[in-house]
Image (cartoon, grey):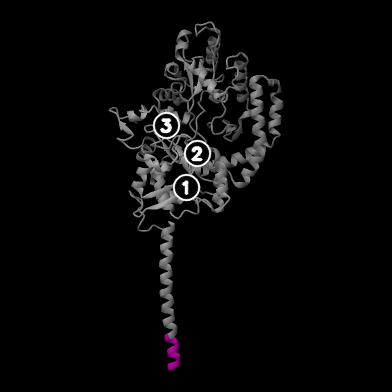
Amino acid sequence: MRKKLLIFVMIFVIGIMAACSNSGNNDKENDEMSANGDIEDENFHKEGFPIVDEPIKLEFMTGKAPTTAEDYNEVLIWQEYEDMTNIEIDWGLTPKEGLTEKRNLSLGSENLPDAYHTAGMPVMDLLKYGEQGTFVELSDLIEEYMPNLTEVLDEYPDIRKGITFPDGGIYGIPTVYDPDFPSLLIGAKFWIREDWLKELDMDVPETTDEYYEYLKAVKETDLLGDGSGDEIPFGATTISQLRQVLTGAFGVQNMGRKHSYIDKDPETGDVRFFPIDDGYKEMLEYLNKIFEEELIQENIYTIEKNQSISNGSEGLYGSTIITSTESIYGEEEGSKFIGMPALEGPHGDREYTKVGSPIAHMGGFVITKENDHVPETLRWLDYFYSEEGTTMFFMGIEGETFEEKEDGIIDYMDDIKNSADDSSLEQELAKYVTYLGGGYPGIVMQDSFKGAESLPSSIKAAEKIEPYIIDEIWPTFTYTTEENKKLSSIQSDLHKYVDEMQDKFITGAEPFSEWDSYVKKVESMRLDEYLEIQQAAVDRYYEN
């Protein structure tokens, strides 16, 4: 009996020791979970600043534009933000010309950064590495740790739809263009010479026919007053801008410029491949007419950007499509242009379709599985989806880099706009901010963004267009891995053929008597499969 009792006591003691040991292990595991960011620890603050009490360091791979500083840790806003957050960033700056190669090498290795910042992550890679677990799935984490971005997604549900992949996951944090900033969504605008309109006793064109009459009048009139005949009715860096501006007058590309080949069939509501639509043909016939009558810059297909800018600066263009004539052609010549509204086409169509989605880039910021501080990283980034954070990102620090004027408008300090050492504005700004070059995560708002789209003339031009902007704008769609494979094999040939024939029809190299043959050729290039995939992507987008 005493022997059995002794054995029982020994088992009981061993059990207690094991329990204590396990308790210690659990404490250790909880500590490790805290360090890995799986649960919040005492060092982390879910609200306010600093984000952490004891400093931590994050390693990024960051795309570096030539216009930005060589060391971001010497840039004013990042010095200030490190002090605010207690989070130090090893930026891993990578020049954009070598970014793709270096990014791909890192993804193919085990040497991953904590996050990719402004690294141009392709949509296909977001899905591929998201499904593999290389990228952290963020949908629930955004809700938990990014209140500013969550507010944006709640206010504009189409943005949330657009960044959600077929498996329901979100693998990248986007660059968002504020939907209330139409000048930015429009980008390059349609401009016409106001002084030449007055000299020709013409009103601003409202229809495609009236625009054609203006182009003819410019060609036939000595508006330069030197008898040279150098007037160019329409000139730009590419003809694609003019084609996109005209699509809404001919009833095609009705879901925005992110989609150059598909839109929504107005009769069925299904996806349509509009480059074989009758309206698209009429648009090409219109472009062919003004091209053959030499109303478009003769070398529009080959002109270099600098030559086009020079033509505009010399006052040769009667109309153009560009972000801002003042900022690009100079104040003297640029101020002679005014914005054009959307044109009405031959069948009464009048929509402005050359407008982008608020989702400017889907992969502005991506967190990898190597990140031990996911909540801290998301909180660090979320600030730049707030009005205060956006102002800091684009304008710097009040009193040091910008000031508020009496009218409430904020602007850079005079010593930045007029550098003592004759540095350009871009060169001077590189000391204080890093947004120059684009592709960054965050939200771009009109009040704090001082690019060409915010100039008074650009805002005024956008106001003329705004009444005609399409009601719905499709973002870039997401596809499954299998869909991506099929699309890649189909669209490389399909899109190439359409683009080549488009140019041939416009220039007259291909007569319109061959249109039916062109349509049959397009339909034979697995168009049914292509549309089936696009329709599936559209259906998912609406269901998200």
Task: Classify residue 478 by image quadrant.
Answer: top right
Q: Amino acid at mark 3?
A: Gln
Read off the residue under disc 2: 361
Disc 1 residue crowd, few under 14, some 14–19, many 20+, Cα 10 Å: many
Q: Main secondary structure of the magenta part?
A: helix
- Count of numbered marks: 3
Residue 95 visible in the picture: yes
Task: Classify residue 272 by image quadrant.
Answer: top right
Read off the residue under disc 3: 427
The region drawn magenta spans: 1-9
Vertical placement of residue 332 versus 272, above or below: above
Question: Looking at the image, which residue sits at the far front?
Answer: 421
Considering only order in the chain, which callout, 2 or 1, is on the residue closer to the N terminus? 1
Vertical placement of residue 401 versus 339, above or below: below
Residue 478 visible in the picture: no
Considering only order in the chain, which callout, 2 or 3, is on the residue closer to the N terminus? 2
Read off the residue under disc 1: 60
- Where disc 2 sits, the SS reads strand
